[in-house]
Image (cartoon, rainbow, N blue to C red):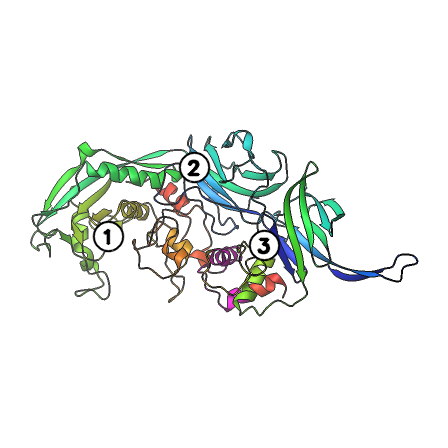
């Protein structure tokens, strides 16, 4: 395919390549979403070092081999392209063998060899051979795997229990760990340690839960009974203070919640208000993963605005795990209504880049979660 | 820098002559879009040749600025990227003398993003993504890319700040 160029104003910049996720549909463990939000790299934690790369970033757990997809935006589909690593002790190109030519589907496999501090690495795409000119680049971040212990509580409220079971949660946490794999974080769930809780009254020992089976909150201004005080989430606080297991992330599953799919206080909220996660039965595995991202120091949402009335509606925001809700209301714009994960389904991108607050609100979810994962309980 | 030159050719003893219109435009190959500004984003060492009207009229290798002074003869030239002397990629290059459309217009926005190297697809009458069609994925993505790269709020809303920055960066 010959690329057509129509030069105006006597000047034209040509940027041939970009990267994207290797698959569409639900998350796949060896096909992480690629943080391709712009070509600027954003702020970097001190341990990431500085890099001249400009392009997409992707997270890889140390020892994993993942697939990413190269898009030939402004170069012939048949141009022979090769992938190389600037530091094979950090990241290595595993396929295509010998680095290229990269097949027509654009799939390149990269192994995260080792997590070194302050040693940035770049996957470079070259024209013609392994030594050809560099046309585009991807910056992988390799993360040593950390295990975070989770204990699940199956909650019955006034006689009505969650439909989840210890066994069903095995699959849930497998799916959650697929989403979290690019960050080098694995949630360790042991079905045998799952607890059952029977609740009828709040922490005051007197007031009953408002609705059987339901965590009732009044956090929204429009919800009847809203007081703009801790009274608005006292049922939540009661649940997350029920027999919490030390040195674990405590996740409580209830049948229903009137305002949310899930609700989280991270461990900066000391008890008695407490910290932990509550998820309703209509929370998808993606939603539980979303709550865990809140728990790991990411309180904001993907659509949060930097100014009133400026909430994100764009395709990038909907691709983020921290967009809410999911499923969302269709907009009638095809690329917003399917951001690669299915119709009106938010994505699973946990941002690697940390773009300035003025650009995207709260960002840098991967480095924030990694930092908090050192002190998660 | 660009120029438009008209060269009259007349063979000896001929009563006829033809005219070659040659326009030279600047192409920049970069790993990321936007003006380079010394940000180390150019593609260095690209071997190329320019073919027009069946003849190779220029050969070269991009330097540190990734720039090719591209001569366009007879309205269209082909830029051929080479590897070890073999052609590996083609660009059909045409130039327009028309001014950029107003930045308030969709086509004007797409023209500027395209000029800056943002990847807006290959739809439209010229096959370069420039048209008046709204709600195209590649266009929204390129607006977001541009806003992010320019430290603007990345909501894909092309407000006055985004339009002003498009104009500034495109130089018109």
Q: Nearer the viewer, mark 1 or mark 3?
A: 3
> Disc 2 to disc 1, how far (Cα)?
29 Å
Asked if residue A80 is positioned above or below residue A36 in the image, the reply reads above
Mark 1 crowdedness (10 Å alpha carbons): few <14, some 14-19, many ≥20? many
Q: Which mark is residue A60?
A: 2
Q: Are marks 3 and 2 in contact (CB under 8 Å)?
A: no
Same chain for labels 3 and 2? Say yes or no. no
Label 1 – label 3 distance at C-alpha: 42 Å
For mark 2, give the secondary structure: strand
Rendered residue at 76%/62% (across/down): B4
In the rendered structure, the answer to whether residue A14 lies left or right of residue A180 reads right
Tell me the chain of label 1: A
Please state if A371 lies on the left or on the right of A138 as rendered: left
x, y percent for residue A25: 36, 45
Please tell me in which quadrant of the rendered image residue A182 appears.
top left
Q: Name the residue beneath numbered marker 3.
A: B117
What stretch of residues is rendered in magenta? B138-164
The residue where tag 1 is placed is: A261
């Amino acid at each position: 395919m010959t690329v057509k160029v129509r030069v105006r104003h006597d000047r034209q910049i040509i940027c041939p390549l970009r990267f994207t996720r290797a698959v569409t549909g639900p998350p796949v463990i060896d096909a992480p979403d690629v943080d391709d939000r712009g070509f600027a790299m954003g702020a970097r934690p001190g341990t990431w070092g500085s890099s001249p790369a400009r392009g997409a970033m992707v997270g890889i757990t140390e020892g994993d081999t993942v697939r990413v997809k190269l898009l030939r935006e402004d170069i012939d589909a048949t141009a022979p392209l090769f992938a190389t690593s600037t530091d094979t002790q950090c990241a290595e190109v595993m396929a295509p063998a010998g680095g290229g030519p990269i097949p027509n589907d654009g799939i390149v496999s990269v192994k995260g060899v080792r997590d070194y501090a302050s040693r940035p690495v770049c996957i470079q795409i070259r024209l013609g051979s392994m030594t050809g000119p560099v046309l585009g680049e991807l910056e992988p971040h390799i993360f040593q795997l950390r295990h975070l212990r989770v204990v699940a509580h199956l909650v019955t409220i006034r006689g009505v229990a969650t439909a989840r079971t210890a066994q069903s949660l095995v699959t849930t946490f497998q799916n959650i760990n697929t989403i979290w794999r690019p960050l080098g974080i694995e949630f360790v769930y042991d079905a045998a340690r799952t607890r059952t809780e029977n609740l009828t009254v709040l922490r005051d020992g007197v007031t009953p839960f408002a609705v059987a089976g339901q965590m009732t909150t009044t956090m929204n201004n429009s919800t009847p009974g809203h007081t703009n005080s801790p009274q608005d989430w006292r049922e939540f606080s009661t649940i997350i203070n029920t027999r919490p297991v030390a040195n674990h992330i405590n996740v409580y599953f209830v049948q229903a919640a009137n305002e949310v799919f899930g609700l989280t206080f991270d461990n900066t909220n000391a008890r008695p208000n407490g910290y932990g996660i509550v998820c309703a039965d209509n929370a998808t595995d993606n939603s539980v993963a979303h709550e865990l991202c809140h728990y790991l120091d990411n309180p904001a949402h993907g659509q949060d605005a930097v100014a009133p009335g400026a909430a994100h509606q764009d395709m990038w925001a909907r691709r983020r795990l921290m967009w809410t809700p999911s499923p969302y209301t269709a907009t009638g714009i095809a690329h917003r209504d399917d951001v690669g994960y299915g119709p009106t389904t938010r994505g699973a991108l946990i941002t690697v880049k940390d773009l300035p607050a003025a650009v995207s609100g709260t960002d840098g979810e991967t480095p924030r979660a990694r930092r908090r994962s050192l002190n998660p309980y | 820098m660009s120029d438009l030159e008209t060269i009259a050719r007349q063979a000896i003893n001929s009563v006829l002559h033809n005219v070659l219109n040659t326009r030279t435009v600047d192409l920049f190959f970069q790993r990321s879009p936007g003006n380079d500004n010394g940000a180390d984003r150019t593609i260095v060492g690209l071997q190329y040749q320019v073919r027009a009207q069946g003849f190779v009229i220029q050969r070269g290798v991009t330097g540190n600025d990734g720039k090719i002074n591209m001569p366009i003869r007879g309205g269209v030239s082909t830029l051929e990227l080479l590897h070890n002397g073999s052609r590996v990629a083609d660009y059909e290059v045409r130039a327009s003398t028309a001014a950029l459309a107003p930045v308030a217009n969709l086509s004007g926005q797409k023209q500027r993003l395209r000029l800056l190297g943002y990847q807006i697809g290959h739809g439209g009458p010229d096959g370069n993504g420039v048209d008046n069609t709204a709600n195209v994925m590649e266009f929204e993505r390129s607006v977001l890319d541009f806003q992010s790269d320019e430290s603007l709020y990345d909501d894909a809303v092309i407000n006055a700040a985004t339009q002003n920055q498009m104009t500034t960066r495109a130089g018109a």
